[in-house]
Amino acid sequence: MSVADALTTIGPLERETLGERVYGHLRELLMAGRLAPGDKISLRATALALGTSMMPVREAVSRLVADRALEVTPNRAVRVPVMSEEGFRELTTVRISIEGFAAEAAAAAADARAIERIAGHEAAFRALGSQPVADLAEAVRINKNLHFAIYEAAGLPTLVEIIGALWLKAGPVLNLDLGANPDRLARSGAIRFHAEALAAIRARDGAAARTAIVADISGAADFIIGRGGLAAARNRA
């Protein structure tokens, strides 16, 4: 999916609290993997797609640059950062620790409504995997929603905020996994790991929930590094 196509999924915004809303929508695109490493962001095209003036877009982009979710290149272009393999390995290590803990906490704290939400996202992701030609952009989005449904079930808002900051950096890179090719979803192992995480949370088995989420994160990272996805993104940028 191109940057322009991704932006059109948002639609024009209301004028009320415009800067915040532009920031929130661009943040969601990054976290949900709708933008890939090296993608360039045109402020003018973004404003046009969202039906806003340039000012709220500039404000939102400046905040995302401060968050290190976007970067300004020497020629003043704005783009999604391209991560080195070393940086990605570090990010993966941190994610494994923090998100594994969140999954374990969710197994202890999740109520019936939270489990129902998790189950809905798990079923939607599994259904995509059974399609002859899966919508990979949608798979990346549902993957994000499923993970955050699990983390929010822990009932620790500060923890979810920390994980959100990690996903601002991780989301675009995950585009290199589930968005890799049409049959990647069925072969990724993510469907099995998600099902195991859901079963563990239902069983109040914190250790098993942590193991499933760690396996999901590790499997995606191994695939991205193994296929040279980070190097390909650098070349494209």
Image (cartoon, rainbow, N blue to C red):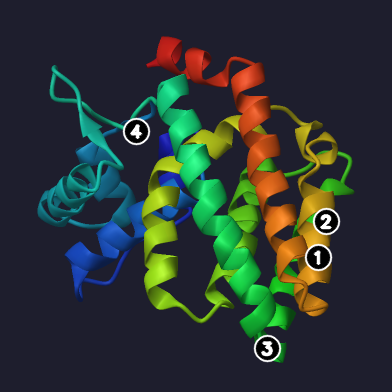
- The circle on residue 113 is 3
Q: Which residue is mark 1?
A: 123
Query: Callout 2, which amino acid?
Result: Arg
Q: Would you call the spot at circle 3 few (<14 residues within 10 Å), some (14-19), or many (20 or more)? A: few
Query: Callout 1, which amino acid?
Result: Ala
Marks 1 and 4 close (CB-CB < 8 Å): no
Query: Callout 3, which amino acid?
Result: Arg
Whole-percent x, y for residue 228 in the image: 59, 15
Whole-percent x, y for residue 106 in the image: 62, 75
Label 4 vs 3, first from the N-terminus: 4
Q: Is label 3 in a helix, a strand or a loop?
A: helix
Inter-mark Cα distance, 3 to 2: 20 Å
Whole-percent x, y for residue 180 in the image: 66, 28
Q: Is residue 229 left or right of residue 74?
A: right
- The circle on residue 80 is 4
Inter-mark Cα distance, 2 to 1: 5 Å
| Most distant residue in the front direction | 207
Residue ID at (78%, 37%): 188
Inter-mark Cα distance, 1 to 4: 31 Å
Marks 2 and 1 close (CB-CB < 8 Å): yes
Residue ID at (63%, 65%): 103
**Quadrant in the rendering for residue 70:** top left
Q: Nearer the viewer, residue 76 or 187?
A: 187
